[in-house]
Image (spheres, helix red, strand yellow):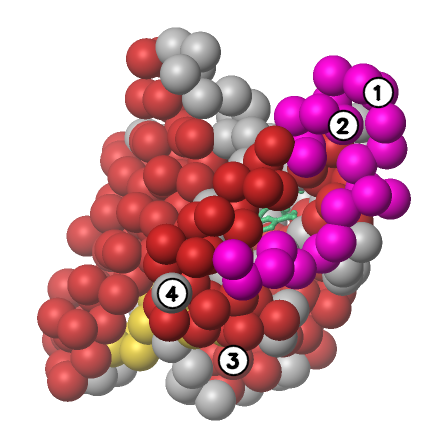
Amino acid sequence: MQIQDKTIVITGGAAGIGRSLGRACIEAGAAHVVLADRNGEGAMAAAAELGPAARGTACDVSSEEDVQSLVSETLRIEGPVDIFVSNAGVTAKGGLDCSNEQWQQIWDINVMSRVYAARAVIPGMLERGSGCIVQTASAAGLLTEIGSAPYSVTKHADLAFAEWLSVHYGRQGIQVSCVCPLGVETDMLDEDDPVHKFLYLQSITADEAANSIIRGIEAADFLILPHPDVLEFFRRKAADYSGWLRGMQRLQQKFGAANTSGRNASQEIPITPSPN
Ligand SMILES: NC(=O)c1ccc[n+]([C@@H]2O[C@H](COP(=O)([O-])OP(=O)(O)OC[C@H]3O[C@@H](n4cnc5c(N)ncnc54)[C@H](O)[C@@H]3O)[C@@H](O)[C@H]2O)c1
């Protein structure tokens, strides 16, 4: 779908990838861009920088009521939503030690928000015979993220829901894209975390990620990969799942050792896990 003249809603629009994507959409000729974020003031400030075609608003995407209001307000003020970008997301470090509350919170933000958005916009898109849903998942949804079970699991679910939407509605005029980046230089990357230091080795800026998302939407790509290497990692995983797991286990062990000895993991660990 072309961005020109479209009405686009972007969640997580106050910062990072969402904020850059708002700018990129305006530059690509969008008619209206609505930046929604639980940080409402941040969203309004980001929109103010983009001029009269942009509006910022408060919305907690883990609340279905908030997402419904976001869509009905957009319909009232700007008109029907052509492209809805479910981008807001959070991470949580840890594995078995993460509490049930942490799991529930990240599930609601990274996964249920996508369900709420689809419920709110797809009926109108079906009536018009056209619409586009974009979900910012992560390379962690195709591969995994060492150090965070909730992030890995919810990003797999994010990708799975996008895939399901595409299968179910693709023949009815609904385009679906799923964005799966590796490291992007935003507040989400923690410079003190050895896994994130590792991601910095191949990180890109939020503007680069946004430009890649625009190209992917306009090319109607389902999988949008701002880091092309992710495709090669995904292919290796599919070709030899057990071998890929053995490579990831070695990587996990190195991170654990680097973590406990205080060594700089990012200088010692090769970016690509060897295949076996
Ligand atoms: N930065 C990376 O390296 C990276 C890599 C892969 C995927 N991603 C994904 O990209 C998306 C955007 O992340 P980012 O890197 O721009 O992070 P960011 O922290 O810079 O921005 C995320 C934005 O989402 C907002 N947000 C968080 N919870 C919200 C909620 N409940 N309701 C509404 N807004 C909420 C935050 O206020 C913030 O403005 C996320 O889904 C993230 O998982 C990021």
Q: Secondary structure at mark 3?
A: helix
For marks 4 and 1 on the same chain, the one whose residue lies earlier in the sequence: 4
Q: Nearer the viewer, mark 3 or mark 4?
A: 4
Q: Can you see residue 30?
A: no
Disc on res. 258: 2
Say whether disc 3 or disc 2 marks the residue closer to the N-terminus: 3
The quarter of the rendering in which ligand 1 is drawn is top right
**Residue 29: percent from the left, percent from the top?**
62, 82
Q: Which numbered marker is on residue 262? A: 1
Label 3 neighbourhood size at 10 Å, few (<14), some (14-19), many (20+)?
many
Q: Secondary structure at mark 2?
A: helix
* Labels 3, 1: front one: 1
Q: Which residue is mark 3?
A: 216
Magenta span = 254-276
Disc 4 designates what residue? 240
Task: Give the alpha-carbon distance from disc 3 to disc 1, as whole Å.
Answer: 40 Å
Residue farthest toward the front in the current orientation of the protein: 276
Tell me, yes or no, whether the two marked residues, 3 and 4, touch with CB atoms within 8 Å. Answer: no
